[in-house]
Structures are given as structure tokens and as C-alpha cells.
Amino acid sequence: MSEDKKPSGPDLTTGVSLADFKDGKLLGHVGSEDVLLVQAGSEIFAIEPACSHYHGPLADGLVVGDTIRCPWHHACFSLRTGEASRPPALNALAVWEVTRDQDRILVQRKREAPKPSAAHRTAPTPEKFVIVGGGAAGFAAAETLRREGFAGAITMLSNDGAMPVDRPNLSKDYLAGNAPEDWLPLRGEDYYQSTGIDLRLNTNVVRIDPRARRVTLANGDSLPFDRLLLATGAEPVKLQIPGAEQPHHTLRSVADSRAIIKAAGSAKRALVIGASFIGLEVAASLRARKLDVHVVAPEERPMQKVLGPEMGDFIRALHEENGVNFHLEDTVERLDGTRATLKSGAVIEADLVVVGIGVKPRLALAEQAGLAADRGVSVTEYLETSVAGIFAAGDIARWPDPHSRHTIRVEHWVVAERQGQTAARNMLGRRERFDAVPFFWSQHYDVPINYVGHAESFDEVAIDGSISGKDCLLKYRKGGHVLAVASIYRDLDNLKAELEMERSRG
């Protein structure tokens, strides 16, 4: 805490009463540290008040049992221990001891943080676990295995040149110039050394042999495994038009984001092909860098298929207010140097082209290994593939979703992290069903959009509040059943919708 920042609320070491609480929470301080008091049932807990992910205010969050959920991106923390029990948060929060003196509640001593398991150092086992992929699911699995006390070998094979990073930042704050690069890694290099996770970057796996229980690398080496997690993620769909070999960018990795930032430094006009979430976040970030931005997409409205026509109109208006030029119901037919010719006949001159027309799951390894697939790797509710001991998580996995009652595959960061955690526990034999409600967030300028559930199609959108007023909750229904909920600045309502879906699943 900086010296000029004063702590919030009352001094909790001198005591407060329950009458001081608002909605079961009270923000105060112990010395120079802010502390949040939370009433959960008959118990009172004291916890650090800012989420360890992006510092969301837990005072505005939702208490569920003896946990508290962050209003911004739905991370969850144990009120007893401070541990992060659900992504996207990874780091624990501090907690304090609470005592009662008659009707006064006192907070004085900070509890010692739970120590990470040292089992891998003190009691090694001969088991070998291999993770193919260095994204959200792969990292979450490796981290969870160690957190759960797995003492065997963990080898993490990533074809990326960078350590696992906070990928949502690549199209948002980092690309916009509002976040330094050292914010990106999920963990520093010393983490992998201290936890005994053998992270191998720039490593391509070319073959999986399910019978021999081995993976073969591009350099000819092979590794044995007792359990394997496939978390190969997705890759950008490539342009298939004349001139597609012309210089242009996609955005999936740190290297991609760096390249766009470098190109933006000397560019004046950018063309974004595709009005996907990534495409529009890139458009917003490039506007923050003062580029003239044009977006070309075949849809009538941006994001209409996912968010409906009303939200689509709002997103278009929001971007137009910030200077983005849309060319909708149109496509790029040819690239020629800095010239893009559209189907409508219009020509856009651009010295920076970014393509965001979707991604496709990387399924080659799974198909080569003979794993059952259906527009993704088919997995059970335990995230196990058709071959025992081989699991899949993240963008490649198609799983039975108990809420929509369909098998689904989604490309969301938080879903991939949560699947990685569940897969890790099931690699350890826990038999834990993956039944988390899908969640994602998107940021457009100063407007956050939170979305829970999954609606591949819907026949009704019920709107509460004002979309244009940036204060709304939208429910997407099909046959009267709420499949998904989106919101702008209705964070607590969004959390409650998630909880309601959890309780009604199956």
C-alpha cells in the first residue's frame, strides 16, 4: 500500500458490531491493510478484499456457503483459508482471525498462509504424467496436480515459445498499451523449477501411441506416460482468398500480440477482418493506439449470433462512437499489398491487417491416436477420452453439459482453466464430474460484458434494464428454458444467475 493511501472503513482491531454490516459485508482495516468482514451463516470471516486475478472488489461479490465469488470474472475463494478454489484467480488471499467480545467483532492477527504441497520434493513416486499444451487448461492441470500433492513427474509440452500467459490480456489491456508485458506470465520461470514441472517450450508432439503409452516429439525423442492430458487448444482459421499470402496478422500468442503492437507503431490505418470477440477487442485496442480502424464482417450486426440483435446494435454503436468504421454484410475478396477489395466493390487501404474469423480445435494428434471425436475430442463427464488414462480439456474437448443437456465445446479461457483443474484431479483417480457453468467476459473500451451459460441458439431474449444505458441483464431462452445470461454492470445478478444454473443442472 502506498504511503499516501489511507485504509478503508473502521479500524477492525477496536471492534465493530453486526449492525455495521451491509448485505453481510463490511470493509475496514487492520493497521495499514484493508480487510473485508463477511457474514456467512452464523460465522464471521475476515479476508483480503481484492480478487487476486484483476483486483475485483469482493465487497460486491456473492457469498456461497463459506466461499466468496468475485463480481468481475467469477473467481472463487475460501473464506476460511483464502485459497483460490476456482479460476481465473490462482493466488490465495490473506485471511485474519476473528473473535467476538460480547456483541463486538474483533480482527487482529493475520493467519499464516497455507503452504503449497512439497510432496513432489519429499516423497517422489514413479508415476509419469504428460500434458500436451501450454495454454489455460494445460497450466491449470499442472498447477492443480502439484497443489493436490501429486509427487510424480509432470512434463508439460508446449509448442509456444512463451511460458503460459494470461491470454485474455493479449487482445485487451496489453494490446491497447495499458498493461506491461511482465503482467502476462501466469507464473514466473522459478515456479516451474521450484515445483518440479518440466516445462518444455517450442516443443512439438507428432505422435501419441495409446498402447505403448508414449508420445513422440518432432526431434525424434519419445516420452512414456502413465496419464496423458491433451490440451492442444485451438488455432486461428486462415484466410482463403486471393492475396492471403500477403502480410497479415492473427492473434493467439504473445508473439502475435507483440507483432501487432510493433506493426501498429508505424501504421496509420488498420483493417480487422471479422467481427468476433477477438476481432472487436483488437479493434478497440488499436483505437486506443490512435489508428484508423475498419472492420469487415459478413454479419448484419456484430456478435448477433451469440448476444442477439439488441446487444449487437449496442456493440456496433459503442465501437462507432469510439471511431471504428464498420463494413457489415460484406467480405474481403482480395488482398493486394495495402489494398483490400470487398465483395461490394469498395476498396480499403490499410497498412495493418488483422484477421479474426474464428478458430478451429487442434485435433490432429487426437485423430492420429484414434480417439473418438465429434467436432472436438469426445470426453465423458470426467473429461476422459475414449482411451482410458488419456484426458482432454480446453478448446478441443466436447463434453456432456448438464445444464443445456447437450454435448458442447466452447472456447472460453475460464472454462479451459476449470477443465484443466478437473482433469488433473481425475488423472489422480478422483472421479470428479465436470459440471461448471461456462463463463466468459469481454471488454470493449469501458464496457465489460459478462456471459454465463451456453446458448448455441435461442428463440427469445428477455432484457431487464437498459442496454444503451450500460445497465442490463439479458436472458437467452429456448423453449422457455434459460440457457445463458449476459450482463453489463449487473455483476451481482450475473453471479446469481450462474449459481441458479449450477443448482438446476441435470
Image (tube, grey):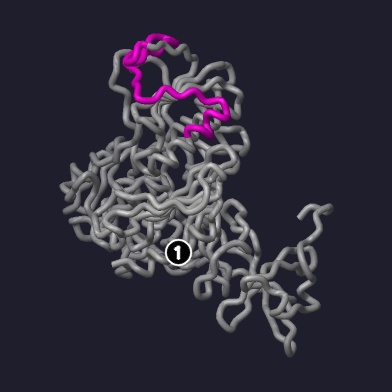
Q: Quarter holding the C terminus?
A: bottom left
Instruction: Return the x and y of residue 259 as percentages of the image width and height.
Output: 50, 26
Question: Label 1, on which residue?
Answer: 120
Query: At 19% from the left edge and 43% from the top edge, which residue is drawn?
Result: 367
Front residue of this view, candidates 207 and 59: 59
Instruction: Return the x and y of residue 285 as percentages of the image width and height.
Output: 55, 31
Count of numbered labels shown in the rendering: 1
Magenta range? 316-345
Q: Is residue 19 above or below residue 230?
A: below
Q: Is residue 360 above or below residue 271?
A: below
Label 1: state its secondary structure. helix
Work out whether residue 112 can be spotted.
no
Query: At 32% from the left edge and 27% from the top edge, which residue is drawn?
Result: 238
The question of residue 267 being in magenta is answered with no
Specify the quadrant of the image occupied by residue 237.
top left
Q: Quarter holding the N terminus?
A: bottom right
Q: Is 46 situated left or right of 496 in this image?
A: right
